[in-house]
Image (cartoon, rainbow, N blue to C red):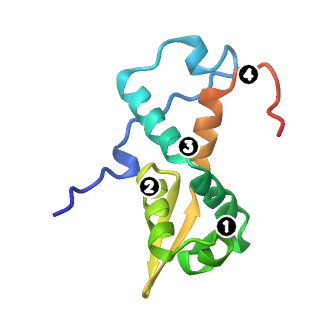
Amino acid sequence: MSTPTASIQDRPALPVIDQECCTPLLHEPITVSQAADLAHKLKALADPTRLRLVSMVAAHEGGEACVCELTEPLGLTQPTISHHLKVLVDAGIFTRDKRGVWAYYALVPSAMDALSAVLSTGSQPVRA
């Protein structure tokens, strides 16, 4: 029997950036629960396939994609992609919407914004 995972609302929020001062990591130490949440999100993103999934889903028409639309471009099997998508959902980076037999995934913009704010030094705009 699987253990229920906490919903996004049940997780401690990452600290928000204080525009007057600096980012949370530079302003004051983060709490144990904030560090655990940040590590969970970073671990979810620390995989080349999952990074590609974030990019592909965010760039997909309508900002959402079905696992059936991701297998061919990634060259992976549906179960493998579903595993990676589950990791991203569990980390609060994607949402999952079941429609019939297929599940559609969409990026949670606030999750990426929170990560960006926490990790930013605030001194320079981020450039690719």
The crowding category of the residue bearing disc 4, from other C-alpha atoms within 10 Å (few below 14, some 14 to 19, many at least 20), is: some
Mark found first going from the N terminus, 4 or 1: 1
Q: Which mark is residue 63?
A: 1
Viewer-closest of 16 and 72: 72
Q: What residue appears at the point 42 percent right and 86 percent down from the top-left corner?
A: 101
Quarter where residue 57 is shown: bottom right
> Circle 3 sits on which residue?
46
Viewer-closest of 73 and 92: 73
Mark 1 secondary-structure assignment: helix
The crowding category of the residue bearing disc 1, from other C-alpha atoms within 10 Å (few below 14, some 14 to 19, many at least 20), is: few
Q: Which amino acid is tagged 1?
A: Gly
Q: Quadrant of the C terminus?
A: top right
Viewer-closest of 58 and 56: 56
Mark 4 secondary-structure assignment: loop
Give the image location of residue 88, x and y in percent. Answer: 49, 55
**Above or below, comparing residue 75 to residue 44 in the picture:** below
The residues tagged by marks 2 and 1 sit, at their Cα atoms, a distance apart of 19 Å
Q: Are marks 3 and 2 in contact (CB under 8 Å)?
A: no
**Above or below, comparing residue 30 to residue 79 in the picture:** above
> Circle 2 sits on which residue?
87
Mark found first going from the N terminus, 3 or 4: 3
**Above or below, comparing residue 10 to residue 119 in the picture:** below
Mark found first going from the N terminus, 1 or 3: 3
The residues tagged by marks 1 and 3 sit, at their Cα atoms, a distance apart of 22 Å
Mark 2 secondary-structure assignment: helix
